[in-house]
Each structure stands twice: as structure tokens, then as C-alpha cells.
Image (tube, rainbow, N blue to C red):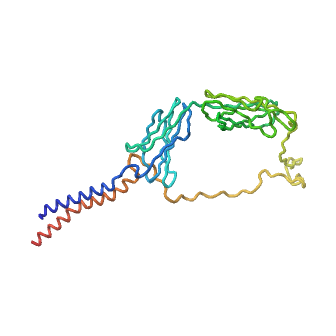
Amino acid sequence: MPTTTRFLAMIVLAMTLLVLLLMVAAPTGASSAFQVSASPASPTFPAGANGIFIVRLEGSTDMLPSLDYAVEGASLEGVVSLNVTGPSTAEGAVHVRRDSAGTARLIVSFGGTTLATAEARFVPMGAVQVQVTMNAGINAAARTWRFEVVNASGQVAATLSAGTSGDAPTATVTSAMLPHGFYTVRQMLGSDTRTACAPGVFYEVAAPVSAATTIELASATARAVFTIRPCADLPRDLQVSIPVDVVAPSAGGVVGEADVLASQPPIDEVRGTRQAGPGPLPARTGNIPLPPRTGNTSAGTEENRLPLVFIGLLLLVSAPAAIGARAARERLNR
């Protein structure tokens, strides 16, 4: 076979080998490196407010991909990039907004391929307010009253606590956003609070008479009003017992050993001993996650391809040199 023909054959063989190596190293699709799922953070969101989708990635997290997001039926308000949450997991968030009741749909894609979809339902919502007034005068003790907001299905939708005192006899507390509908607001009665005064009862709920009322939440807020009154059995001389330092200064105004009563040692301002806190935290060891990858390249693809590409190029460059050396030996042997 002529030398030129052998040379061309070797070139074709080297190029073919390089193409095969590139085909083996080429990515087979985004799904081969990781899997993506999406879900709403809550079953419902209030119309006119933001809703959140949680995006979860499972698989290779050495180099996180840059995912693309599209929203139907709502506006895209913001994106929290993927962050590593475990050895092979990462999570991000997508904030969307819809001003009216309806459904918002999130589409997650990578490189033009849809990886996951999710839907969130937006409904009209508002807040339940509870106003409680303690009719006991300016010397009334401070108390905390608890209330439950129960939906039409009998489930407790919110628990609220309101505090009153002689200085602030009326308090108003507000629940989180709730879907529109009918709710029952009931006071959680304690051992000294009842719907009517009786022996051993300190407080009675004057209104509503059953310590519960039903309201309709059809706008931004709906309010339930409670009034509480003291009963005759409420002690009138309640006092607070606090530690009293028995040290009395002498006539000169300086506290000395002679001013301390032997039978009643003074109370220290701060008890116990001080101890040194822990030292600086040890340096973090182990694998530190890399920052999120930008662009639309699958995780780990280029790292796997580079060695194979170098091998192919080396074969392509060395083939002509080997053929030239062999042709020179043949000429010398003639």
C-alpha cells in the first residue's frame, strides 16, 4: 500500500476514534444527571398576595444547573437559587403573585426540556380579629386570655392569645390569613373563668354569653368582640411576693458587715459563678459545596469530557508523526 494511502487511512481512523469518544462523552440529557420536582408550599394562598413553589433537585449537586422558570396564570415575583441541602439534594423557591382567585402553574425547564410542573390555588382570604375587654378598673391584674378560631369543618384554624391589665383593659389580636367563610371564635376557659359567676370563679365572660360566637369572613378582616368581668370571689388583696434585701445602710450611708442581720443573710444581685465561654469554633473540614453553576450545561458534563477530548487530540496529532517515521525507515531500507 503506498505511503500516502496509509497516511490518509490513519488520519481517517484517528478522526473516527475522536468522534466516537465525543459521542460517548456527550450528555444523554438533563435527566441523566439529576431529577427535578416542584410543589406549592401551601395548599392555598391568598389572592392578591405571593405564593411560593418549592423546587427540589435530586442527583448530582457538584455543579448545580441554572434552571429556567415560566409561570402561567400569575406573575413571577422572584426566584431563590438552588442551594445544597444534602449529599445529593438541593432546594430553591419561586415566588409568584395572583391578584384574583384561580390557579397558577409553574413550569421548570432546562435546555428547552420541561423537567417539572406544579399548580397552586389562590383563594379570597382575610384575617379574623379578636377584641377582648376586661371591665375591672385600673387596678386589674394582668391576665392572658386564649381563643380558638374554628372553621366550618370543625377544625381549629388559628389559636390566639390576648393580654389585658388595668393599664390596658382592651386588647386586639389578629390571626393569619384564612380563606373566606364562616368561623366560630371561642374562648378557652380556665379553672377560674366561666360563662357565669359561681363559688370559686374569678371571672365571667359577659359577652358573648356562651363564650363563643360565629362570624363570616367575607372581606379583609372580621372581628369577634368579647367582654370579661370579675366575680365576687376574685381576691381583692392580691400581692406579689418578691425577695427583699435585708441589708440596711448605717447612719453614715455605707453598708457594712454590722448592717447585715445574722439570721437573714442578704440576697446576692447575681447568684452563681461566671465561667469562660467556649473558644472559637473549629475550622470547617470536609467537602464544601461549590457555588451554583450558571448557564445551561448539565452538571459534571465538561469535567467528564475534557480527558477524553485530550486523548482524541493526542491520537490525531501523533498519527502523522508515526506514519512519517515509518516512511523514513522504509526509504532507508531500500
Viewer-closest of 256 and 271:
271
- Measured as percent of width and height from the top left, residue 141 is found at 81, 36
Tell me the residue at 41%/46% (across/down): 294
Q: In which quarter of the image is residue 127?
A: top right
User: In which quadrant of the rendered view does residue 10 lie?
Assistant: bottom left
Q: In this view, does 318 lie to the left or right of 96?
A: left
Q: Residue furthest left?
A: 334
Q: Where is residue 239 in the image (x, y as percent from the top left)?
A: 85, 40
Q: Quadrant of the N terminus?
A: bottom left
Total labels: the figure holds: 0
Screen quadrant of the C terminus: bottom left
36 relative to 237, above or below:
below
In this rendering, the answer to whether 132 lies above or below 40 is: above
Most extreme residue toward the top, as rendered?
219
Up the image or down, 309 lies above or below 242; here it is below
Q: Residue furthest front?
A: 153
Q: Quadrant of residue 17?
A: bottom left
**Place of residue 115 in the rendered image (x, y in percent of width and height, measured from the top left):** 42, 44
Q: Nearer the viewer, residue 252 or 125?
A: 125
Q: Residue at 80%, 52% (x, y): give it.
A: 268
Residue 126, position as x, y percentages in the image: 61, 31
